[in-house]
Amino acid sequence: MILAVAEQRDGKLNRATWETIAGAQQAGGEVAVAVIGSGVDALTAELAAAEATAVVVADHAVLAQYTADGYVQALQQIIAAEAPSHVFFPHTYQTRDFAPALAARLNRPLITDVIAIKKQGDAVVLVRPVFQGKLNADVTIGGPAPHLATFQIGAYRADAARKGSAAAPVKAAALTLDAGSIRQKPEAPFKEARQAVDLSQAERIVAAGRGIKGQEHLKIVEQLAQALGAEVAASRPICDAGWLPMDRQIGSSGQTVAPKLYLALGISGAIQHLVGMKGSRTIVAINKDPDAPIFEIADYGIVADLFEVVPALLAELNK
Amino acid sequence: MTRDTLDVDVLIVGGGPCGMSAALRLAQLQKAGGGEPLSIAVLEKAPDAGAHMLSGAVLDPSALRDLVPDFQQRGAPLATEVHQDRVYFLTRGAKLAFPLTPPPLRNHGNYIISLNRFVKWLGSLVEAEGIDVFTGFPAVELLFEGDRVVGVRTGDRGIGRHGEVKSNFEPGVDVRAKVTILADGVRGNLTKALVRRLGLAEGRAPQQYAIGIKELWEVPNDRVPAGTVIHTMGYPMRMEEFGGGFLYGMPGGLVSVGFVSGLDYPDPMFDPHVAFQHFKRHTLVSSLLTGGQMVRYGAKAIPEGGWHTIPRVHADGVLIAGDAGGFLNSLRFKGIHLAMRTGMLAAETAFEAVRKADLSSAALSAYQARIDASDVRRELYPVRNVHQSFGYGLLAGVAYSGFSLVSRGWWVRDPMPSHAGFERMKKIADYYRDGRPDPDATVNPVKIDRQLTFDRLTNVHYSGTRHPEDQPSHLIVHDTDICRTRCREEYGNPCTRFCPANVYEMVDAGDGTKRLQINASNCVHCKTCDIMDPYQIIDWVPPEGGGGPRYEGM
């Protein structure tokens, strides 16, 4: 059985949870979903829609707020009870915080940032990028179960997660947790003064690059984003010039995103940018230079001046 | 603001082959000598041991044998022994094999290594001795009492790009030490400051530098047999330029391919990165690489000047070792063993000084005596004028190199006169008398196919370089007006060419002129800009700890 661990905060599921469930389902075999928190009935019901053998709920006052110790202890007990062959996580900041500790506690291997699963006979082969995405390594894990792995955001599509014909049975995990054994004291979540955006959660992104030429031209990018219901993002030169805040930067020194639609305006497609968005489902590129590398990965390419194409698109969208 | 202080007996700045060897030697002396244990710390700016290490590399194992006699049993990651040396002179379309390998280039008994792996291994031996290796901690300034060095200050964390204090601010730590060993590498920022402040280079010849640009390739297995060492001279360099290429075959189809360009070229439009691409397109190289994949990229300056350019390496409370001091044999293209050896000698001197509680420059001058009595001098002194002879052209250099083998380095003027490399760069108007080239274009362009040849930005990606974007630029250009006006006119902004990482760019200022843009987060810490800038207005200082390249396997 594969255990897919959901991630939630304040009763809201992280979108990557469903990606993890989809990945677990595609690995084949039985899938159970674990959810951790306090007072998470609504979430449990939401997750029970998945095609799964069970939703295991770790509901405990100690788990109301995320702590690495709380999650490690809860998952350790769930894993002992359920004896899964594999435990899969979304590769989020939170997972990165506690999964290594969990693996160490269990003395089991943890494979991070997995982008695909292959089956070779009975063996599960995990594919993960190495050399900054230049090569993919096939990883098979030996030794006793469970084997732990995290999935890169966007590796699987959330909407590919299969839903069951009936709600999956819900199972409350028997937990013995003690607030005294939690060494971390969570404080109120830290917020940047400026509202930070999490572009990895955006379904559509309109991104601008050097071809936009001047800050004053960002207006049409914003208009297009608004018309599409999209977030605005940019390549490094734009954020570096201060035309957009750094949290809107996509690429190796910014965020990694995998939206349904990525519209690249005047972005040449340096590899530093591509690694941050190549997982997007549909990539549309508008660039004057037909040799721009962005066209090598674009699904739709328009070789034209963005200042002609974007107003035309806007006119069409606003009809 | 409260600043933490750490007191140690011996502080080693820089966790490269030199610093790690020094630390290991100290641990050995401690074990052998007994007594009150010395406290030792190593500071390293890279996020983990070896991450900023870049070299060819062929290792002369002489120092390793003395430092870790059972290095084979202890799993030293030496990729392969050298089985074959080949030397070629290249012309644009052909190669001419040297009938016999010149003695300095004979590598029998040496090993091809990844310096990254090697230093990681050395670091593990150091940590196994209980010595703290503080990775991710750059030393940004020396602490003085009068003119006596009493330690270093590490860099602050959490400063925004406009100098503002961010929520994650942590002030740097003052590490106070009885003896500080500076092993901060080629053009080390602390060594540079110390040498200037105390005039340690007075009466010495100017240091000569080169820049080495290297890629790691995976090619079909039998293409470059493991243990093959190929060196080239000639194309794409002209007679007035010093430099050459290398290819080292390792097991599993891994090949190190690189090109070294002397940082003393007269042509202001010369571009070391473009020269490297031309080298790869030469049939000798392209026939070996085509069909393979580039997997890593990096660049690093090399101190080539040799014996006469080494500054005084001791002062009150401080010793200088390794590349920081210029301990490198440019005729053999080797410095790792000298870095290790001088690290060991510095450690022996520091140990003795701490035990005797005499930390004066006079006591520490025992270090110089140790160097003079060691293989370091035996190796470097006879070739003391060789690199300088190349300053008179390729033919003069080759001729003198041969002569020096017989003369043991003698020359009518000793030291042979030389100039700092940046002073040799000519102004565009003087070099291009028949017409001014476009400073934003390449004079000798090369086709970029992203298979065999790459643009700088793509290459930088493969260096694994990362710096948090929200920090002040660690490339300090003291007067950017010069870039816009004088330099553009006089030299055509050579920083945009000699930087191998696309850090320096001239972008439209919006008023029809160009202004300098510094992409500091691309910096691979090679130090070339600090060295080669014709106005000497660029200062390389360490960025926030942990930033920089990740030379996995390089």
Image: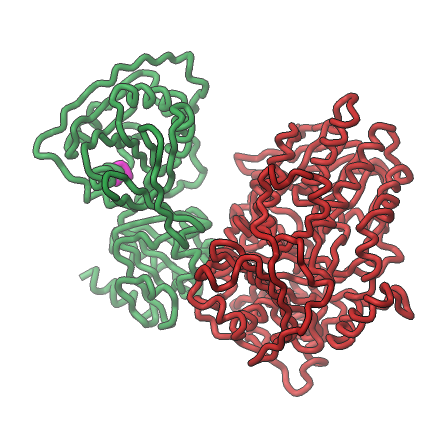
**Residue B85 seen in the figure:** yes
Which quadrant holds residue B498? bottom right
Q: Is residue A143 left or right of residue B372?
A: left
Give the colour scheme of this rendering: by chain
Q: Is residue A66 above or below residue A205?
A: above
Q: What percent of the width, then of the height, locates residue A23? A: 25, 40
Q: Nearer the viewer, residue B37 or B156?
A: B37
**Predominant SS along the magenta part:** helix
Q: What percent of the width, then of the height, locates residue A228? A: 25, 55
Residue A160 in magenta stretch: no
Q: Is residue B522 left or right of residue B542?
A: left
Q: Quadrant of the C terminus of chain A?
A: bottom left
Q: Nearer the viewer, residue B424 or B508?
A: B424
Q: Residue at x 78, y 45 (%)?
A: B320
User: Where are the magenta residues, as a range?
Assistant: A15-19
Q: Which chain is red?
A: B
Q: Residue at x 28, y 21 (%)?
A: A78
**Residue B51 seen in the figure:** no
Colour in which the image shows chain A? green
Q: What percent of the width, then of the height, locates residue A130? A: 42, 48
Q: Is residue A1 above or below residue B202?
A: above
Q: Residue at x 83, y 47 (%)?
A: B374
Q: Residue at x 56, y 62 (%)?
A: B257
Q: Quadrant of the N terminus of chain A?
A: top left
Which quadrant holds residue B17? top right
Q: Residue furthest bottom?
A: B434
Q: What percent of the width, then of the height, locates residue A129? A: 38, 48
